[in-house]
Image (cartoon, rainbow, N blue to C red):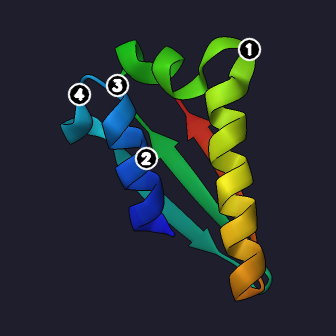
Amino acid sequence: MKSLIEQMVKALVDSPEEVVVSMVEGERTSVFELRVAKDDIGKVIGKQGNTARAMRTIMSAAGTKIGKRCVLEILE
């Protein structure tokens, strides 16, 4: 799941080397924390949050398949 997020985000941003995804694993939930360059935050979130919403939808579908709830947090 972590590599999936990295791959999606690196395709969107201008500074792919600054993309960092960390994972906090719980019993039933996995929280993925995404950090990107300040200039790239808008590209990751998208207009009205559409890009971020789409990534969260993909993660939710993938998480359902493995039986876990996956949460994406975009940090500044």
The amino acid type, in three-letter code, at marker 4 is Ser
Answer few, some or many: residues within 10 Å of disc 4's Cα (few below 14, many 20 plus, some between 14 and 19). some
Looking at marks 2 and 4 on the same chain, the residue that comes earlier in the sequence is marked by 2
Q: CA distance from mark 3 to mark 2?
A: 15 Å
Percent across and percent down for residue 47 are 65, 12
Lower sequence index among marks 1 and 2: 2
Q: Hey, which quadrant is residue 15 in on the image?
A: top left
Q: Nearer the N terminus, badge 3 or badge 1? A: 3
Residue holding disc 1: 48
Pair 3/2: label in front: 2
Quarter-wise, where is residue 54 in the image? top right
Sequence order check, earlier mark of 3 and 2: 2
What's the distance in space between the residues labelled 3 and 1, CA to CA? 19 Å
Front position among marks 3 and 1: 1
Q: Residues within 10 Å of mark 2 (few under 14, many from 20)?
A: few
**Viewer can see residue 64:** yes
Query: From this viewpoint, which residue is outermost toward the left?
Result: 17
Q: Are marks 3 and 2 in contact (CB under 8 Å)?
A: no
Q: Determine which of the numbered discs, if any, sits on residue 15 in the image.
A: 4
- In three-dimensional space, the C-alpha distance between marks 2 and 4, rounded to whole angstroms, equals 13 Å
The correct choice, above or below, for 49 with respect to 29 in the image is above
Tell which tag, 2 or 4, sits nearer the viewer: 2
